[in-house]
Amino acid sequence: MTRTALITGATSGFGAAAVKRFVSAGWRVIATGRRRERLQVLIDELGAGKVHPAVFDIRDAAAMEAALAALPTTFRDIDLLVNNAGLALGTAPAQDASLEDWQTMIATNVTALVTLTRRLLPGLVRRKGAIINISSVASTYPYTGGNVYAGTKAFVKQFSLGLRADLHGTGVRVTSIEPGMAETEFTLVRTHGDQAASDKLYQGVDPMTAEDIAGTIFWVATLPPHLNINRLELMPVNQSFAGFQVNRAS
């Protein structure tokens, strides 16, 4: 039986790599994102019968609902939801940060994620499906400038655990995947397009790749149905934990 996954944020990074990984294993994939031309690249590469593009801004609940209502029959029975769409904006400390950036992160990483999840839950329960939410190591380890981004990812982690508790007995599996440093467009978006900042961050680190995370998502999704990975934290070997800060001047 061919299974169907819905993967948000499929126009780049983890999402695009996950679409390719699942299709290569015979899944059908609904790929969502704002950039139609990037979704078309996936279709051209993988095939229209295997990938259905759902073009909408994840923050627009009405557009989300319209896209779901318009799914072709062969893509309507969703077995797996991968809540991957999300972003970080800005690196400034809280007292200097942009409130607009904060609101955009909350709308994308929290509000949109719970809206889509709630919409798909009845079908996932009927099909004994699975939900994989992409959180971050920032949900556990604070760092300067992380503020609202880290807060939204902590929400994703805790929401995943809450879902797991609420869905007890339904057969639905829920996992929070919490990656550390991975080289994608993440830092470009966070710095509003500063390629030099992105290059500097990843230089000499040997960071994880989008394909690494896509492989992890696929592994979790294809475990035997009686197994549930509650949380999975992963980092490149060259990343670990920072020390505490101490200010002796105040």
Image (tube, rainbow, N blue to C red):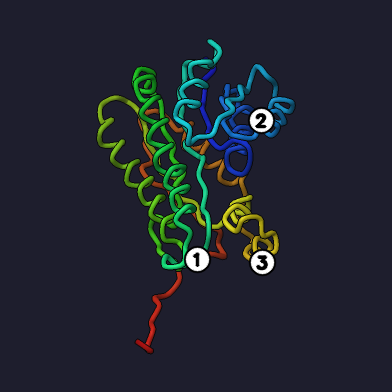
The residue wearing badge 3 is: 200
Work out how far the residue at label 1 is from the one at label 2, CA to CA, in angstroms: 31 Å
The type of residue carrying mark 2 is: Arg
SS under mark 3: helix
The type of residue carrying mark 1 is: Ala
Image coordinates for residue 185, horizontal then vertical, percent: 63, 50
Q: Using the image as rendered, state which of residue 111 and residue 84 is in the foreground.
A: 111
| Quarter of image, res 72 | top right
SS under mark 1: loop
| Residue shown at the point (50%, 34%) measured from the top left | 58
Q: Using the image as rendered, state which of residue 47 and residue 145 is in the foreground.
A: 145
161 up-or-down from 40: above or below: below
Image coordinates for residue 49, horizontal then vertical, percent: 65, 16
How many residues crowd around disc 3 within 10 Å: few (fewer than 14), some, or many (20 or more)?
few
Q: Nearer the viewer, mark 1 or mark 3?
A: 1
The residue wearing badge 2 is: 36
Quadrant where the C terminus sits is bottom left
Q: Using the image as rendered, state which of residue 61 and residue 14 is in the foreground.
A: 61
| Quarter of image, res 17 | top right
The type of residue carrying mark 3 is: Lys
Q: Is residue 112 left or right of residue 235?
A: left
In the image, which disc is placed on residue 92?
1
- Tell me which numbered mark, 2 or 3, is placed earlier along the sequence: 2
Please count the marks in the image: 3
| Residue shown at the point (59%, 46%) measured from the top left | 212
How many residues crowd around disc 1 within 10 Å: few (fewer than 14), some, or many (20 or more)?
few
